[in-house]
Every structure is written in C-alpha cells, then in structure tokens.
Image (cartoon, rainbow, N blue to C red):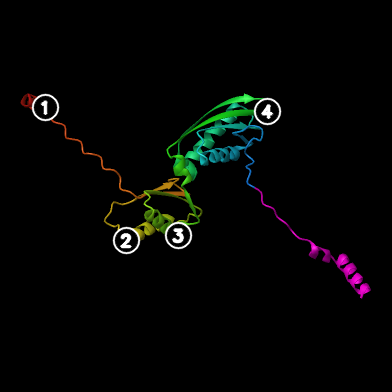
Amino acid sequence: MARIIAALLSLCLLTGCASLLEREYSTSEPHSSKFWESEAAGTLRAENYQDIVNDLLLAIGQHRESVTLRLYDFGNDVTVAETLEQATTEIQQETPMGAYAVEYITSSRQSQRGYYEVSVQISYRRTAEQIQSVVNATSTEALYSLLETALDEGRTELAVRIGYWGENSRTRVEEIVAQLREDRELTEEPAWTVNYYPAEGTVGLIEFLLDAPEQQPEAEPELPAEEISEKIENDT
C-alpha cells in the first residue's frame, strides 16, 4: 500500500497535480491613500493631472478649507499653472461632489528642490454636515425609499450620490417624485426643488429640497414724486 501511495504522489508531481494543493490567500488592511505624503502631515502628493483631481476631491470630501499639494515631475511654472487651472475647473464643473459643494478654489505655488509646493484654498457652499449626509445609491430606483425615509425623519433636504446614470434617468427621477408625492398626499403642497450635479452630462449627485421656498415679503410699490410730497404734507 505504501508503494502505491508513493507512486501516486510521484505521478501527481510529474503531471502537474501539485497545483491542486496550492491555495490563494487574501488579506485586508485599513485604507491608506497613496496620495498623502508620509513625512508631511496634511500634505498631499501628485505626480500627474489625475492625481491632482483625486487629491482635491479627497480634501473636499473632508471639507478641508486649505490643503497643501506637492507636485512632482511637472516641469515648469507654466505647466503647473495650466494643470491646476484645468483640474480645478474640472472639479467644479464636471465632478458631482465638486459641483455640489464647492464655491471656488484658489491656489498659490512655490518651486522647491524636486517639486512644486501648492497651497490650495477651497470655499464651500455646503457645510461639512451636508457633505457627510450625502447617501449613496446604485441607481435611481433607490430614490423612492430614500425620499420616503427623509420625509418620515422630518428632513428638509436629501442629497444622493448615484452610481449608475442612464439616458432616461431624469425622467425616472421625475416619475418617482410624482409617485411619492401622490402616495403621501402631497400633490397640493409646493413642488420640491430637484438639482442635478453636474448640471449637464452624466449626473452623479441629486439634491432634493423638500420644503417650500421662503416667501419674500412683497415690496410696496413706489409712489410718484408728487404723491410722495403730498403724503408727507398730509402726515405733518
């Protein structure tokens, strides 16, 4: 019997059966962004255009009002200036979170040995709480339940990051809103405001304002100069 077992093992090794004994293992570690400079707290690094965009989006997600970037392999001042302008424009106009949260971005740069150090200032039109309250959904089909929960909790706004956006998604959003308002008997209430970010192209974030806009007091009509003089004389 021992000889038979030994023979089988030898046959397996010769024919490649040893691979059946191999196992693959995977480990999970806490996320550590490659964009942070290890030796400089609060400083991000970038080696190309996409790194800059990712760095700034990371800072925006944390509602950081200022951040320092170290840019490597960017050549000269002109290249750095043009790249920063292009990246900040893309973030504000084409990315969902940038279009939703950012008012404007400014920067100043200084050449160092081997890299450019860029000081970035970010002004927001959304609070840190609003950014942290953004919820994720794989598609627009999740909006009904998310909106229903927001109403049950008495919330006046809801921002949803959408994973998939199709050609008919805007129409689907309108249908979901109309169906929910009908189901909740809210059709007589003022219409909700729905904002899309970015406004054009593929939408990645939708904002719902569920309360009626505040009514501004109507201004009194201006009187002609003659009537104003007459009114003053009568009052005195």
Is residue 209 toward the left or the right of residue 78 in the image? Answer: left
Mark 3 vs 1: CB contact within 8 A:
no
Amino acid marked by disc 1:
Ile
Q: Who comes first in sequence, dot 2 or dot 4? A: 4
Q: Who comes first in sequence, dot 1 or dot 2? A: 2
The residue to which callout 2 is attached is 182
- Compute the Cα span from label 4 to label 1: 72 Å
Give the residue drawn at x 41%, y 56%. Answer: 149
Q: Which mark is residue 6?
A: none
Q: Is residue 123 above or below residue 175?
A: above
What is the magenta range? 1-29
Q: Is residue 13 above or below residue 40?
A: below
Q: Say which element carries label 3.
A: helix
Judged by depth in the image, the label closer to the viewer, 1 or 2, is: 2
The front one of 2 and 59 is 2
Judged by depth in the image, the label closer to the viewer, 3 or 4, is: 3
Q: Which quadrant would the N terminus be assigned to in this image?
A: bottom right
Judged by depth in the image, the label closer to the viewer, 2 or 4, is: 2
Q: Which mark is residue 141?
A: 3
Question: Is residue 168 in view?
Answer: no
Residue 45 lies in quadrant: top right
Q: Which mark is residue 114?
A: 4
- Compute the Cα span from label 2 to label 4: 62 Å
Give the residue drawn at x 79%, y 61%. Answer: 22
Mark 3 vs 2: CB contact within 8 A:
no
Q: Say which element carries label 1.
A: helix
Amino acid marked by disc 3:
Glu
Q: Is residue 198 above or below residue 225?
A: below
